[in-house]
Image (cartoon, grey):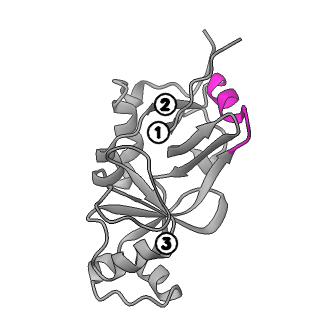
Amino acid sequence: MEKITYLHNHFLIAMPTLEDHGFQHTVIHICEHNEYGAIGIVINRPISMLLGEIFQQMKLNCPDIAINQLPVLAGGPIDQERGFVFHKPTEHKWRSAIKLSREIAIATSKDILEAIAAGEGPPQFIISLGYAGWAPGQLENELKENAWLTVPADKHILFDTPFEERWFESIALLGINPNHLSSISGHA
């Protein structure tokens, strides 16, 4: 029986051959992957919504113009009203937060957004709406079909790299020049 390698806290990098237009050139942070399936959040697709709009909807006052002007990401096609906050772990314990690694955590509770609006949140964060999900075995099949490359998640790409460069930089972590990837797939 084939041993399954789970990809918790890895990036999925869309191959040029990926035909699903919703995921072309995406980088997805896999937050959970086990025998029940996988959940991940796209980290390189800003939408037209700004963080200040989320604060307004939640009736939160944020006096910091720079925070209000931060882009929100399209995290995936599922539950697009649900927010996710990637952040560096801090001493503060948010009500609904999971530490994915020593350098990356994710929260879904209102208290982290309240803290960010008040200027008391984590020093680095990104906010996404929605997520991507895979049924049991589905992601493994997509990997066998060469739809994705995988690499351990990198905090610098998540927090410091501009959105439009994340796909290229994630591939570069593998030592691959993205310009050398073929749009024609094959199996060895």
Q: Are marks 1 and 2 in contact (CB under 8 Å)?
A: yes
Q: Which residue is mark 1?
A: 11
Tell me, yes or no, whether the highlighted magenta stretch contains residue 143. Answer: yes
Residue 48: mark: 3
At horizontal 46% and vertical 40% (from top left) the residue drawn is 9
Q: Quadrant of residue 146?
A: top right
Q: Magenta region: which residues?
A: 134-145
Q: Closer to the camera: disc 3 or disc 1?
A: 1
**Badge 1: residue crowd in 10 Å (few <14, some 14–19, many ≥20):** many
**Element under label 1?**
strand
Locate residue 59, reporting x and y percent.
48, 91
Which corner quadrant holds the N terminus?
Answer: top right
Residue type highlighted by circle 2: Thr
What's the CA distance linking mark 1 and mark 2?
A: 6 Å
Relative side of 49 to 139, left or right: left
Locate residue 18, reporting x and y percent.
62, 36
Residue type highlighted by circle 3: Ser
Q: Which residue is mark 2?
A: 150
**47 above or below 114?**
above
Residue type highlighted by circle 1: Phe
Judge by depth and name the residue closer to the eye, 97 or 30.
Answer: 97
What's the CA distance linking mark 3 and mark 1?
A: 24 Å
